[in-house]
Image (cartoon, rainbow, N blue to C red):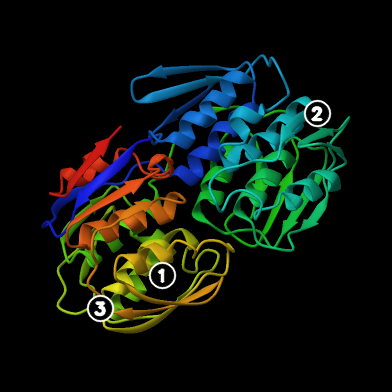
Amino acid sequence: MSKFIIKGQRPLSGEIEVKGAKNLALKVIPASILSEEPMIISNLPKIEDIDKSLELIKELGFKVENRGSELIIETSHVKTFELSDKLADKFRTSIMFVGPLLARFKKVKFPHPGGCVIGAGGRPIDLFLDGFSAMGASIKASGKYYYIEAKKLKGAKFFFPKVSVTGTESLMMTACLAEGVTVLENCAMEPEVKYLADYLNRNGAKIKGAGTSTITIEGVKKIGAGKIKIMPDRIEAGSFAILAAATNSELTIKNCNPEHVSVLLAIFKRIGVNFEIGDDFLKIKKSKDILAYSIQTHEYPGFPTDLQSPYTVLMTQAKGVSLIHETIYDRRLIWTDMLSQMGANIITCDPHRVVVSGPSKLYGKRLISPDIRAGIGLVIAALIAKGKTEIDNIYQIDRGYERIDERLRELGADIIRIE
């Protein structure tokens, strides 16, 4: 198993470029199934979850071709309607293939999707199944598999009892080829949702309201594919901004949209992090003192759960006491025990809340990455820490951050990968 060896307290500086958004790319790839035409994608991040998604596309019988900076997916002929457990078990967003397959081919078989420690078990797919059922699909469960069929999908009114980004995107895509009008309420408002809808609309879909809490989709008989360039990853941009603040480094984050991390920048102003923004860059400057500030994760435009782990590390270096309240995922604070092992002063209140007192001196330890975002949090902690840190199970980090070790070395970090 691969691991990172990181020697901390090295000065960092320079520029780092944000890659394509993982949370959009993993929806665009299954969206290719909606059309018989070839889809051309650019700015795809080179990460593990994208590789798994493309493997799944190929396993269904579709063709994938790399042409330098572009990737072409051709889905005119399907070989199977079954998502194999050997792939679907490994990443949560395999569930995103179900809606497009059902919409175009009217049947699909799939196992319960997997992923990391927060992806399995604790993240049910009831919202997806209820939405498909509302559109007229029949659902059967046998063992670990689900079988869904629909002679005809019909538009429906569906209210999400819990805001879900993947649920919103899945039902929105499915409704594109359903007969009649679908109204989705209490939808996720993330930028990726609107970006996906805009792409589908350019190719014949009729979607209104994406980016708001109510989305209306008028079904069409078929849509095209065309080209799409993946937007910059706002979570990666935020992670790098927090990394710079936590290590008190001057870094310029290129190819990003600062508006997508407005909530983080608002907090930076409050806690004393100096920064400069442009149309497509964010520059973090050195700061004298960082003050503690409590956060509560929330759906967009609130504080992203995917930035909670890096932010918790930042709070170990801030003056004062902060409360980190994770409201989205039950298991996402478990990893803070590893920060405590490194010397952080953290008290666990319950599965959703921890209290961080700082600043704390961190020391290198041998650690295991439990998930993507905790993994980047551990990397940031290791860059701050005195001595050597070993991080095992970096497969989880590779799922979300392209060549992170190489990119950090270019900034001056002492980080190596050992296979």
Query: Which of the pair 284/309 is nearer the observer?
Result: 309
Query: Residue shown at 54%/32% (left/top)?
Result: 29
* Direction from residue 321 to residue 87 in the image, left or right: right
Nearer to us of marks 3 and 1 is: 3
302 vs 24: above or below: below
Q: Residues within 10 Å of mark 1 (few under 14, many from 20)?
A: some
Q: Amino acid at mark 1?
A: Val
Disc 3: which residue = 359
Residue with the mark numbered 1: 263
Q: Is residue 376 above or below residue 87?
A: below
| Badge 3 amino acid | Pro
Distance between the Cα atoms at labels 3 and 2?
56 Å
Q: Nearer the viewer, residue 74 or 109?
A: 109
Tell me where residue 361 sits by quadrant. Answer: bottom left
User: Marks 1 and 2, Cα distance to the nearest angstrom?
Assistant: 41 Å
Which badge, 1 or 2, is on the more N-terminal residue? 2
Mark 2 residue type: Lys
Question: How far apart in space, not on screen, are marks 3 and 1 (Cα)?
Answer: 23 Å
Give the structural element (helix, strand or loop) at label 3.
loop
Q: Residue at x 62, y 33 (%)?
A: 88
Residue located at (53% from left, 47% from top):
116
Q: Where is residue 247 shown, x and y percent of the image?
A: 20, 64
Q: Percent x, y for residue 233?
A: 39, 48
Q: Which residue is mark 2?
A: 106
Q: Is residue 187 above or below residue 371?
A: below
